[in-house]
Amino acid sequence: MKKGMNAVRTYVITGGTDGIGKGLGLHFLTRGDRVITAGSTPAKGEALRAEAERLGAADRFRFLRADLSTLNGMRSVVAEVEATTERLDGLVFATQRFRPRREETPDGLEYTFALSYLSRFVIGHGLAGRLDQGHAPVVFNLAGPGGLPGRIHWDDPQLHHGYTGKNAAMQASRCNDLLGVDFPQRHPGTRIRYVLYNPLFVKTSLADPLPQPQRAVTKTMAWLLAQRVDKAIPPMVDHIDHPPAAQVTAFRRRTPIPLTGKDFDPDAADRLHELTLKLLAER
Ligand SMILES: NC(=O)c1ccc[n+]([C@@H]2O[C@H](COP(=O)([O-])OP(=O)(O)OC[C@H]3O[C@@H](n4cnc5c(N)ncnc54)[C@H](OP(=O)(O)O)[C@@H]3O)[C@@H](O)[C@H]2O)c1
């Protein structure tokens, strides 16, 4: 059971219907907490509801169907959570879907930018008020901090030119690093702790959207080298249950990553914030 807490905690998990997000959700439900899960596939939501029922947790589980690559989907999650929840203890970001070819969302945004970065921006800032009512509130952003290659294409953030799925994924990771360092600046006096977390290689559904033969290769590599979800989760739960004292932190599994260098540059974070507000204002 929970250490040092007596109230039921409430968590929102985007991308909580599969892989790491699902593993965290089931962990929280098993120990008696409340979980609101957002994902785009109804069948996965129903399967998770059935698991919650088996755990006797059906009344503590809610599935929100939302396509989080769309602004409507992002805003619907914020609105639903605000309408039904006074207090949030944790917000976990775990959406991903690799796109080998450039795709545009109905809002005219590049898919990975929208799903992997913008949904975290909109939902994180949108639910900050509810989080500030929480016990020891934390935003736990699963991305790729810690020296992976990739950069933000400031002159072409929607990647109209020279798109590769890897560039898009890496750009989203760099955007999330800056989103994390910037977060407390936008919420002065907040109690929220923002944790950027790189789980390294975990056996999930991450390879499913890849074209062949990369899918088969990645699945084989995962089978050989990746950590199982149940093994990957304990350090994440520790960070969520006992958020670090610093307002923003980054980890590669349990190893802290210093918030120095260009990936965490406050001026770049400010620039990205302004660029993002402009994109949102135009839509
Ligand atoms: N696994 C790894 O090795 C690894 C390594 C580094 C970082 N990470 C990070 O860890 C997080 C979790 O990854 P994972 O490997 O567990 O992923 P996963 O198994 O592929 O699950 C991805 C989740 O994202 C949701 N999702 C995808 N597209 C969506 C959309 N348009 N709208 C709403 N939800 C959507 C999926 O739900 P639906 O299908 O229901 O939409 C699913 O719940 C990601 O942020 C990833 O970048 C993972």
Image (cartoon, rainbow, N blue to C red):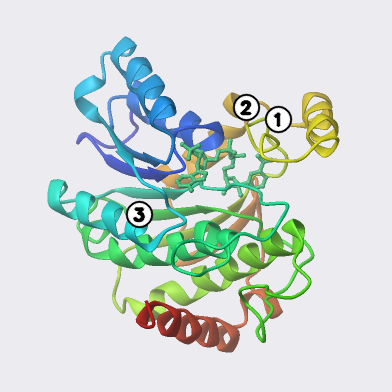
Query: Disc 2 marks which amino acid?
Result: Lys
Which one is in front, 245 or 74? Answer: 74
Q: Position of residue 143 (x, y in %)?
A: 60, 54
Q: Quadrant of residue 169?
A: bottom right
Disc 2: residue Cβ within 8 A of ligand 1's nearest atom: no
**Rendered image: mark on residue 231:** 2
**Circles 1 and 2 in contact, beta carbons < 8 Å:** yes
Residue 73, labelled with which disc?
3
Task: Give how far across and how far down residue 24 sits, in percent.
Answer: 46, 33
Q: Provide the residue designation for mark 1.
A: 227
User: CA separation, marks 1 and 3?
Assistant: 31 Å
| In-front residue for pair 278/234 | 278
Q: Indicate which disc, 1 or 3, sits on the residue closer to the N terminus.
A: 3
Viewer-nearest of discs 1 and 3 = 3
Helix, strand or loop under label 1: loop
Residue at disc 3, secondary structure: helix
Task: Determine the CA span between mark 1 and mark 2.
Answer: 6 Å
Q: Which quadrant: the N terminus?
A: top left
Give the camera-side residue of 262 and 204: 204
How would you rate the neighbour count of disc 3 (Cα within 10 Å): few for under 14, some for 14-19, many for 20 or more?
A: some
* The residue carrying mark 3 has its beta carbon less than 8 Å from ligand 1: yes
**From the image, which quarter does the C terminus lie in?**
bottom left
Residue at 54% over, 87% down: 271
